[in-house]
Image: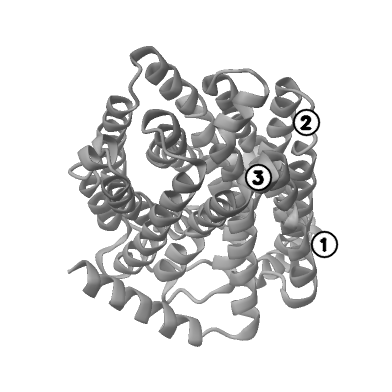
Amino acid sequence: MLRRMSVGSFSAVGENFRRLTRPQRNAFLASLMAWSLDALDFFLLILCIPAIAGEFHSKPSSVAEAVALTLIFRPVGAFLFGALADRFGRKPTLVVNILCYSVVELSCAFAPSLPWLLVLRALFGIAMGGVWGVGAALTFETLPKEGRGTFSGLLQEGYAIGYLLASAAFALAFQHIGWRGLFVLGAAPALLIFFIRSGVEESPVWIAARADAQRRKAAGVRKPPLLANLISYLPVFLFLIVLMTAFTSFSHGTQDMYPTFLQKGRGFSAGLTGWIAVIYNVGSLAGGFVFGTLSERWGRKRAIITAALLSIPIAPLFAYGHTPLALAAGAFLMQFMVQGAWGVVPAYLTELSPAPVRAILPGLAYQLGNLLTSQNLVLQNRLAERWHDYSPVLLGTVIVVALALAVVTACGRESRGVELAAE
């Protein structure tokens, strides 16, 4: 059954992609690559936590504070870059955003101490926080509504692509260049700027909205302040924050501690850990494709709830396997479901967000969810250090957050097929 679902999903991806015009295709690819390379930079730190802890003579839980700071400051970036995108356009804002996170990632390679690294990761959080919302707005305001769920699954799996690239780099290069060398490689996303500047057009919805705003201004009608706009959509905003808190708990709760679990809990080498991470990120990619496409037939809510609940019976293999084969299989299936649910998110949040705040509201809600779960990895590591066992922490996390995500999603409204107009 899984094979039939995957084949059907990949066929739908190919068919929908062929129907796109060149500007639509380039906008999608730019957003996908920006998010993928952003995730690459984020997960390089996740994979290197044991090595960084060793160099700075700290516990993994202390280095995990760097991850927490990244998550804490991501809402700042979502607000800042989202506001810039609503005012100056999606394309130029995305260019500036990519340049910022690339420069900070390079700076991390030269951090002289753990406190310096913590400061730099906080700055990285600001830069990382803007990419998702700006890219999603550019993508879904440019693409046709047909196949939006499929492209949502593809776009969100940029996160898994970034994790996969980071895992492969860790497996192949860590033993030769160390964690600092990997952070130097993490500055490569800056090259993407040249493609965006030359090959990507501005969102047609934003262009129409700007023309309308100019007509209103000429007629003496003033645009409401940004904060007033957000407050006017407060019920939707609050629901999205709660939803994204559940989503970020689901992803970070199953992903961030797993490399440390494999190295510290199971004694696997950095190379073996990296290859297992590659395997479970292939599962992430497949899950996003499958459930993103299924959301076009089932609806957004049903696809999310199904993926979340199916992760629970997989949790024992994921958390208590002992051999590399068992753990790779459990992690593959777990991330198939986790990123399957996440594959629906870009389309779902964009569809639920009103046009005047579409670049800022989804991304800000997403990153506020990250803020509310920012201590997740620190807490998980401290519990594992106290109990001298990572497995019950991972198992308990999956069960609690999967149920919470299913319940919160059930309380929302369906949005499949809505029009994304300028007003």
Residue 161, x across and y down, in percent: 52, 59
Mark 1–mark 3 CB contact (< 8 Å)? no
- Looking at the rendered structure, the kind of residue marked 3 is Met
Q: For residue 24, say whether it is visible.
A: yes
Residue 98, x across and y down, in percent: 73, 54
Mark 3 Cα shell of 10 Å, populated few (<14), some (14-19), many (≥20): many
Query: What's the CA distance linking mark 1 and mark 2?
Result: 51 Å
Query: What's the CA distance linking mark 1 and mark 3?
Result: 36 Å
For label 2, the SS is loop
Closer to the observer: label 1 or label 3?
A: 3
Question: Circle 3 is placed at which residue position?
Answer: 128
Mark 1 Cα shell of 10 Å, populated few (<14), some (14-19), many (≥20): few
Q: Residue furthest top?
A: 386
For label 1, the SS is helix
Q: For residue 84, say whether it is visible.
A: no
Residue 155, x across and y down, in percent: 51, 63
For label 3, the SS is helix
Q: Identify which residue is drawn at 24% across, 40% down.
A: 315
Q: Identify which residue is drawn at 60% across, 29% down.
A: 72
Residue 182 position (above or below residue 94): above
Q: Nearer the viewer, residue 234 or 282?
A: 282
- Looking at the rendered structure, the kind of residue marked 1 is Ala
Q: Earlier in the sequence, mark 1 or mark 2?
A: 2
Closer to the observer: label 3 or label 2?
A: 2
Question: Circle 2 is placed at which residue position?
Answer: 111
Question: Circle 1 is placed at which residue position?
Answer: 218
The quadrant holding residue 107 is top right
Q: Nearer the viewer, residue 32 or 315?
A: 315
